């Protein structure tokens, strides 16, 4: 129902909004299955391969823990998220003071930006990449500086280093990079971190860490001590753990950075179900291994299928593939009409490409079939 005209929101300056907000809009995450069904009037099957969600639902151990925890929903969550933080600290062999738990990686990125950025500051990263780095900087009135990715779709750490100047506060390394799937090696990350000035905080976004099985891929939590400098390593329960709808993530970081972010965050920003599900997923190694292997099989099937259609996916170590299709918006819209939701990369700065999440084998085959027909129509 439209709002009555008397409730139209007044222009920004009336309320003295911060100048940084004037050119920003609410984040557009793309359409969900419900919206596509409603807006396009699609009655048949809808397959969502647009947000890099794990296709299998939560781990069985997490479902069980949530069913039990649900009965306690009248009680606030544990303040400070101590149980989950202690379990993460134990898993990684770090002090609990170095573990931050937040309402998704997005919330942690938000609090990091709030903790560090003033309007005269800069952040640096390669692009196209996860849009939060840009948006969080803009919200604080800070300035993003970007360099291109390598041709293979990974962060170009030489180019990134050249962006760092006296105003740079934060640098982001998305590894594997979303939306392209490329990774940087341990050796190149290590020399990058060595060359990075000590007053710049590197944020290593490892949202897809658990999918990678390349021995050259660095584990910035386990290898932290070897880098000999402070950094933030970000991991999430939204992807391989299948908990995107619950909003839980964590970072391993210097303890003063953890404390600053905990000062800024809502003490209850992760709810009871999210905490219980994350705790019950954390050490379910067998299920994790099974999902990593299933993703690899699916990713190879998807890549082979795309090559069979004459397309050339970038080499990806994560649970998605990016391909150049000419007009990303047009191809994504045609796929939506056929019940497949993928992400056009225009909003990430690459209007010629789309990104497809690795779904179940059946979803992949459904996508490939629809993609074949879309290409024939174009
Ligand atoms: C999905 C994702 C995140 C975190 O997502 P949350 O659901 O907010 O935990 C962070 N970085 C990248 C690159 C991602 O793709």
Image (cartoon, rainbow, N blue to C red):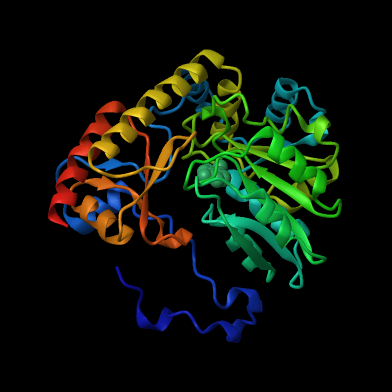
Rendered location of residue 222, percent (x, y): 73, 26
Image quarter of residue 327: bottom left
Camera-side residue: 134 or 13? 134
Residue in the picture at 60% in, 48% down? 155
Camera-side residue: 109 or 156? 156
Q: Quadrant of the C terminus?
A: bottom left
Image quarter of residue 299: top left
When the figure is inspected, residue 186 is found, relative to residue 312, above or below; the finding is above
Relative horizontal placement of residue 49, taking residue 283 as reference (left or right): left
Camera-side residue: 236 or 353? 353
When the figure is inspected, residue 106 is found, relative to residue 283, above or below; the finding is below
Residue in the picture at 51% in, 29% down? 211
Relative horizontal placement of residue 46, taking residue 209 as reference (left or right): left
Residue in the picture at 22% in, 41% down? 309
Relative horizontal placement of residue 354, taking residue 347 as reference (left or right): left
* Quadrant of the image where one finds ligand 1: top right
Outermost top residue: 286
Residue in the picture at 82% in, 28% down? 95
Q: Is residue 111 among the parts visible in the rendering? A: no
Q: Quadrant of the N terminus?
A: bottom left
Rendered location of residue 169, percent (x, y): 77, 59
Rendered location of residue 50, percent (x, y): 37, 46
When the figure is inspected, residue 43 is found, relative to residue 345, above or below; the finding is above
Q: Is residue 227 among the parts visible in the rendering? A: yes
When the figure is inspected, residue 158 is found, relative to residue 55, above or below; the finding is below
């Amino acid at each position: 129902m439209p709002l009555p005209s008397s409730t139209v929101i007044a222009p920004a300056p009336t309320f003295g909004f911060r100048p940084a907000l004037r050119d920003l809009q609410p984040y557009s995450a793309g359409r969900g299955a419900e919206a596509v069904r409603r807006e396009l009037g699609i009655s048949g099957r809808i397959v969502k391969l647009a947000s890099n969600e794990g296709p299998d639902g939560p781990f069985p151990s997490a479902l069980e823990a949530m069913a039990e925890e649900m009965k306690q929903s009248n009680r606030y969550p544990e303040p400070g998220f101590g149980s989950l933080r202690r379990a993460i600290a134990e898993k990684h062999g770090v002090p609990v003071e170095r573990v931050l738990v937040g309402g998704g990686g997005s919330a942690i990125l938000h609090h990091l930006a709030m903790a560090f950025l003033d309007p005269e500051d800069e952040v640096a990263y390669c692009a196209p990449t996860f849009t939060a780095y840009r948006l969080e900087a803009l919200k604080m009135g800070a300035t993003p500086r970007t360099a291109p990715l390598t041709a293979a779709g990974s962060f170009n750490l030489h180019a990134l280093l050249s962006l760092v100047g006296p105003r740079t506060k934060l640098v982001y390394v998305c590894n594997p990079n979303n939306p392209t799937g490329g990774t940087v090696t341990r050796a190149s990350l290590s020399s990058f971190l060595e060359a990075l000035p000590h007053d710049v905080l590197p944020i290593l976004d490892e949202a897809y860490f658990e999918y990678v099985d390349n021995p050259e891929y660095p584990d910035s939590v386990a290898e932290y001590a070897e880098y000999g400098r402070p950094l933030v390593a970000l991991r999430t329960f939204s992807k391989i753990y299948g908990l995107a709808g619950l909003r839980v993530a964590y970072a391993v970081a210097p303890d003063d950075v953890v404390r600053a972010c905990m000062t800024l965050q809502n003490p209850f920003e992760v709810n009871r179900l999210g905490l219980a599900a994350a705790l019950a997923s954390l050490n379910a190694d067998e299920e994790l291994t099974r999902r990593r292997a299933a993703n690899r099989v699916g990713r190879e099937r998807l890549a082979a299928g795309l090559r069979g259609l004459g397309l050339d996916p970038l080499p990806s170590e994560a649970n998605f593939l990016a391909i150049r299709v000419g007009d990303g918006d047009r191809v994504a819209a045609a796929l939506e009409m056929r019940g497949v939701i993928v992400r056009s990369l225009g909003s990430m700065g690459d209007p010629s490409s789309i990104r497809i999440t690795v779904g179940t084998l059946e979803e992949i085959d459904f996508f490939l079939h629809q993609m074949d027909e879309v290409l024939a129509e174009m």
